[in-house]
Image (spheres, rainbow, N blue to C red):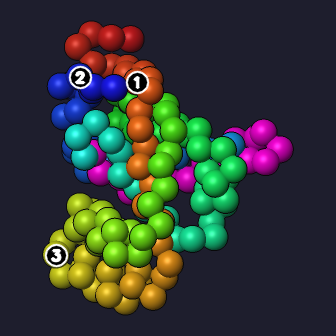
Amino acid sequence: MQLRDDVRAFLEEERFGVLGTVNADGSPQQTVMWYELRGDTIVMNTKRGRKKDKNLARDPRASLCIEDGFRYVTLDGTIETIEDQRTAQADIAALARRYHDAAKAEEMARDVFAPQERITLLLHVDRVDAHGFDGEE
């Protein structure tokens, strides 16, 4: 799905998202996430073995909400997982650079993320719900 220009601009600003996945019992599970917009896909990354990783292996449906006061965007779709470590490590390093200065990002990539098994999460958006843009309520 192609994102509107105003939604794209909002998503490209530095914010955190809340990722919702589905637990085995059908209840929701939410996690605050770093994200990056690449084209019309949202890129996230997680350490293997976390609840969201297990949930997405069973059910790839997900929702990501990004807010800024009264403006927010919710993106619904399916997650594609990338388990290749070269790709996953490069993606978490890129996310660290998005949220931190270059020195801190390099330190985190080397000392925190490199020893971990990481998984890239690609949210392929099927539905966008945007509020607070251009007079929307």
Alpha-carbon span between mark 3 and mark 2: 30 Å
Q: Could you tell whether 91 is left or right of 129 in the image?
A: left
Please name the residue shown 44% across and 60% down the image.
Answer: 82
120 and 50: which one is in front?
120
- Kind of residue at badge 1: Val
Mark 2 is surrounded, within 10 Å at the Cα level, by few (under 14), some (14 to 19) or many (20 or more) other residues, namely few
Seen in the picture, residue 102 relative to 51 is either above or below; the reply is below
Mark 3 is surrounded, within 10 Å at the Cα level, by few (under 14), some (14 to 19) or many (20 or more) other residues, namely few
Taking the image as drawn, is residue 66 in sight? Answer: yes
Please name the residue shown 42% across and 70% down the image.
Answer: 84
Nearer-N-terminus badge (3/2): 2
Whether the magenta-drawn stretch holds residue 103 is answered as no
Q: Which residue is mark 3?
A: 102
49 and 20: which one is in front?
49
Mark 3 or 2, which is nearer the eye? 2
Alpha-carbon span between mark 2 and mark 1: 9 Å
Residue 4's disc number: 2
Residue 83's disc number: none
- Place residue 135 in its image quadrant: top left
Q: Position of residue 38 (x, y in %)?
A: 25, 46
Whether the magenta-drawn stretch holds residue 30 is answered as yes
Alpha-carbon span between mark 1 and mark 3: 32 Å
Please name the residue shown 28% across and 86% down the image.
Answer: 107
Tell me whether circle 2 and circle 1 mark residues in contact (CB < 8 Å): yes
- Kind of residue at badge 2: Arg
Q: Could you tell whether 116 is left or right of 97 in the image?
A: right
- Kind of residue at badge 3: Ala
Q: Position of residue 44 (x, y in %)?
A: 40, 55
